[in-house]
Structures are given as structure tokens and as C-alpha cells.
Image (cartoon, helix red, strand yellow):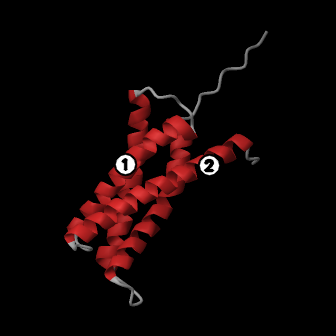
Amino acid sequence: MIVSAQFIKQFIKFILVGFLNTAIYFGVLNLLMFLSGIHQGWLYSLFVALAFILSVSNSYIWNKRWTFQKGKHFKSDEFSKFLLISSISFSLNVGIASFLNNSLGPQFNISPYLWANLSAVVAGSFTTLINFFGYKYLVFGTTRKPISRR
């Protein structure tokens, strides 16, 4: 399989958007934990969910307009596919982070706050590739034009 320059450029843009999404995600998560003093239990899972929703909304806008350059206009079928991929990613993200943090709990003498963040990092790493390939091929992908025969 040969990877094109356009593919590499899109992946780099996707990763850059991902850094912004990650900053939003961890900013919201840590702000909520800091303000509430809560870092475990069902409220932690709610904080993860809220942070994820905000970062995914940002992701849609930047990936549509910049990474995959699919214009500014809202398309309901495109957005539906985006929400499907994001929902799968959301379920995996919240499930993995909640399991690691709430069920497994802090390991190796790591503080609960750091463990909560590490749980979120592990969950996010599993969803990055799912998102890229899902968004690229299922959401923003272009259909190939049939070869015209003269």
C-alpha cells in the first residue's frame, strides 16, 4: 500500500486538530474536576462525557473545513455519519476511561487526579485511529467518478 502525499497531509492536519481537541478535552475535564473536587464515580464519567462532546464538536468544524476541506455548509447526511462515528468513539472513550479510573482505580501509587488523566489518555489513544479513518472514508470521503469510456 502506497500512501499519497495528500493522505499524509490530511493525517498531519487531523493530528493538529486532535491536539486542539485534546487541549479542549483535558481543559474541560480538569476544570470540572478542579471546581468540584470530584475525580471518581459517576460524576467523573459525566465530566468525561461533557469534555468529549465539546471536543468532538470542535473536531467536526475543523476537520470538515480544514483537514478534509469539505466546505462550510451543513449537510445532514454527512453530520449523521459524523455523529455515528463519534458515538462509537464516545462509547469506547467513556467506557475505557471509566473502567480504568472507576473499576481499576489508581495504580502504582499514582495520585487519583493523575490516574484520572492517564485513564483518559489511554481511552483517547484507542479512539484516534477509529476517528481518522471513519471521518476520512465514511464521513468526508469522496466518491470516485466512474471512468468515462469514449
> Vertical placement of 147 versus 7: above or below?
above
**What residue is drawn where x is 38% and y is 41%?**
83
Q: Residue 131: percent from the left, percent from the top?
A: 49, 50
Image quadrant assignment for residue 93: bottom left
- Name, please, the residue furthest toward the right: 150
Camera-nearest residue between 32 and 10: 32
Q: Residue 32: percent from the left, percent from the top?
A: 26, 64
C-beta proximity under 8 Å, tags 1 and 2: no
| Residue neighbourhood size for the residue with mark 1, other residues' Cα within 10 Å, grouped as few (<14), some (14–19), many (≥20) | some
Q: Dot 1: what SS?
A: helix
Residue 11: which disc?
Answer: 2
Q: Residue 22: percent from the left, percent from the top?
A: 45, 58
Query: Which amino acid lies under the numbered mark 2 shown in the image of this protein?
Result: Phe
Residue 113 appears left or right of 144: left
Query: Which amino acid lies under the numbered mark 1 shown in the image of this protein?
Result: Ser
**What residue is drawn where x is 62% and y is 44%?**
10
Q: Residue 57: percent from the left, percent from the top?
A: 38, 44
Of mark 1 and mark 2, the one earlier in the sequence is 2
Camera-nearest residue between 119 and 14: 14
> Vertical placement of 125 versus 83: above or below?
below
Q: Which residue is mark 1?
A: 87
Residue 90 appears left or right of 40: right
Specify whether residue 137 is in view.
no
**What residue is drawn where x is 45% and y is 46%?**
59
Specify whether residue 14 is in view.
yes
Distance between the alpha carbons at the discs numbered 1 and 2: 21 Å
> Vertical placement of 75 versus 88: above or below?
above
**What residue is drawn where x is 25% and y is 74%?**
40
